[in-house]
Structures are given as C-alpha cells and as structure tokens.
Amino acid sequence: MDTENNLIELIKSRKSIRNFIYEKISNDTIKEILECGRWAPSASNRQPWKVCVVIHPTVKRMLAEVSKYGGIIESAYVNFVIFLDVEKGGERVKDVQSIGAFIQNILLGVESKGLGAVWIGEILKNKDQVNEIFKLPMEKFDLMGVIAMGVIDEPMVSQKSKERERYPLEEFIEFY
C-alpha cells in the first residue's frame, strides 16, 4: 500500500477510545506523539501551545476531580493537558484553530502508534481549577482540552463498539 493510502486509512481508522489497560508507555513514544503535534500548522508559525504531560497518579486524580470524565482521565496512562499560550498567540480565532490542528495531529500520532486516546473538552467548564493545579495564570494560559491516552482495552472497546457513521459528502459540500 502506498503512503497516500496509508495516510487516508490512518485518518479514517482514528476513533475516540475511552477504555484503557494500565500499561506503561515509554517517554520516547510520548515524545514522538507530541512531535506530531509540534508540526501542526499555526497562524504565522506562532505555535501557541503549552502541554502539561500528566502521568503521576496524584496529579491525574486532581485532574479527574474536575471532570465528569474523571474515570477516563485516571485510567489513561498519560493525559496531555493542552493550553493556548496567550503570549505566543496573535489573533484568537486563528490561535484556537491552530490548537485544533495541534490536537488532531496528536490524535493521529496516537493512532499511528496503535494506542488509544480521547479528546476531553467537557473539562473546559472548570478551566480555572485546572490552571490552579498547574499553577498557570489564567490570563496567560487558556485551557483548550485534555487528551487521555493509553493502551487500548481491546475486549472492552470491542464490546462497546458500534458501527461508526459519517454524513455523506453530498450533505455538506457544494461545488461551484
């Protein structure tokens, strides 16, 4: 299979995984995945992201306590807590779009390693508490989300698995 088809299949196979088994993931693998994020496009190449990599159980528990998805956060081997670094940014909308590309690149990196992840946005309602955990000033660092990542609990995921659906292209595209 050629590179183009491999990339297309990787994109199509990526899905949110919420069930993990506790198994160590090497720091090298974690860095390779974050490296994927680093190469995301960003407005004026500002790269306005900051990531707190959470592996320590106590910090995971603190993070879990401010999300209704705390169980997912605690069961993941690692959580990437992603902030917009306001001082590196320029225009808010472009910066947020850049963070979205950064997160998607990380999710694709996770998929390429055969690991699982889910992007948790619900935690944004408690962003002040998250900033407090990491002692980051709210005016300088704006929480954008958390990616919980780990080794996939295959039996649990296949038990809960349902067919994934996408709208047909005809429902949202127009040619001019």
Image (cartoon, helix red, strand yellow):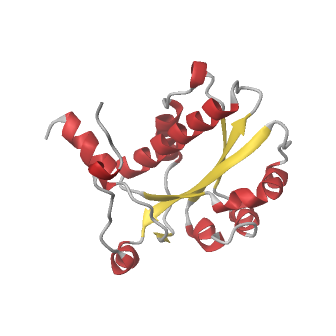
Query: Percent position (x, y) of residue 55?
Result: 63, 57
In the picture, the quarter occupied by the C terminus is top left
Q: Nearer the viewer, residue 95 or 173?
A: 173
| 84 shown above or below 67 | above
Residue 123 in view, yes or no? yes
Query: Percent position (x, y) of residue 22?
Result: 51, 69
| 160 shown above or below 102 | below
User: Residue visible at 31% across and 55% down?
Assistant: 13
Query: Percent position (x, y) of residue 103?
Result: 53, 44
Q: Nearer the viewer, residue 68 or 134?
A: 68
Q: Quadrant of residue 126?
A: bottom right
User: Residue visible at 72% across and 62% down?
Assistant: 63
Would residue 114 be found to the left or right of residue 37 on screen? left
Query: Percent position (x, y) of residue 48?
Result: 66, 30
Would residue 136 be found to the left or right of residue 175 on screen? right
User: Extreme bottom residue here?
Assistant: 159
Residue 80 in view, yes or no? no
| 140 shown above or below 90 | below
Would residue 171 be found to the left or right of residue 52 on screen? left
Q: Quadrant of residue 60?
A: bottom right
